[in-house]
């Protein structure tokens, strides 16, 4: 069975990404076609990205980054949960992605974004970054609105139709993760 990591893409105090990621994990756990685990980048205590060499040339020697690399390498696919900050992804998520290279290669990824306009610009930016790392991002995505899927912009209450969209995206992530598995684990 493929392993899917649901990445909480914000470390900000008062963030909503953790509630959204728990919802993704709960929906995915009902399916039975993959093992799903919540992965919170806040738990990894990563520094700001300041490596001398890019990860494609040399892996980091920092213990926190090595633990992060080990975590990411254990999954076949990912669902990234990201807010939109100023038309992009949070810096902590960008750093977490940038610290690694080979660990992302040949994985599949789905995107769940949120913001005033559904976080779609952050999702599009993340697609560009993941593509450069050799991640096969799937077409379907979930875009949550702060005005309709959160009560008072705070409490996450997704509209019912989002669960079907999430399952469609998960169908694609799981299928691609299975197809790419032999490339990840030769």
Image (cartoon, grey):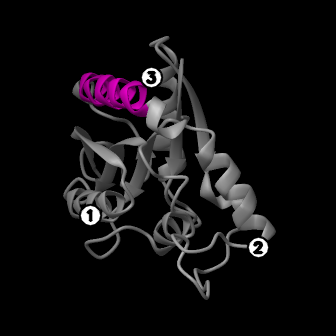
Residue holding disc 1: 128
Query: Residue 159 falls in which quadrant of the image?
Result: top left
> Does label 1 or label 3 sit earlier along the sequence?
3
Above-or-below relation of 185 to 117: above
Identify the magenta region.
163-180
What residue appears at the point 36 percent right and 45 percent down from the top-left corner? 151
Please tell me how crowded label 1 is: few (under 14), some (14-19), or many (20+) other residues with Cα within 10 Å. few
Q: Which residue is mark 2?
A: 62
Contact? badges 1 and 3 (CB < 8 Å): no
Front residue of 138/107: it is 107
164 is within the stretch colored magenta: yes
The residue at the point 63 percent across, 39 percent down is 74
Whichever of callouts 3 and 2 sits on the residue coming sooner in the sequence is 3
Mark with earlier residue (2, 1) = 2
Q: Residue furthest front?
A: 186
* 65 relative position to 90: left or right: right
Residue 140 on image: x %, y %: 21, 37
Q: Position of residue 137 (x, y in %)?
A: 29, 45
- Work out whether residue 43 can be spotted: no
Q: CA distance from mark 1 to mark 3?
A: 27 Å
Graded by Cα atoms within 10 Å as few (under 14), some (14 to 19) or many (20 or more), the crowding at tag 2 reads few
The magenta stretch spans residue 179: yes
Report crowding for label 3: few under 14, some 14 to 19, many 20 or more residues within 10 A (C-alpha): some
- Give SS at disc 2: loop
Mark seen at residue 27: 3
Q: Secondary structure at mark 3?
A: helix
Query: Rounded to the nearest whole Å, what is the CA distance between mark 3 and mark 2?
Result: 35 Å
């Amino acid at each position: 069975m493929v392993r899917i990591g649901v990445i909480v893409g914000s470390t900000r105090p008062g963030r909503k990404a953790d509630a959204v990621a728990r919802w993704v994990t709960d929906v995915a756990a009902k399916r039975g076609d993959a093992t799903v685990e919540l992965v919170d980048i806040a738990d990894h205590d990563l520094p700001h990205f300041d490596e001398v060499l890019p990860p494609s040339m040399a892996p980091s020697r920092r213990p926190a980054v090595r633990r992060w690399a080990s975590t990411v390498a254990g999954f076949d696919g990912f669902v990234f949960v990201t807010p939109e900050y100023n038309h992009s992804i949070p810096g902590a998520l960008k750093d977490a992605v940038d610290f690694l290279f080979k660990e992302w290669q040949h994985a599949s990824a789905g995107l769940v974004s949120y913001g005033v306009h559904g976080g779609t610009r952050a999702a599009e930016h993340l697609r560009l970054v993941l593509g450069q790392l050799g991640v096969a991002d799937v077409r379907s995505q979930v875009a949550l609105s702060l005005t309709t899927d959160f009560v008072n912009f705070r409490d996450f209450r997704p509209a019912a139709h989002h669960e079907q969209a999430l399952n469609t995206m998960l169908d694609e992530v799981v299928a691609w993760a299975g197809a790419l598995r032999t490339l990840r684990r030769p």
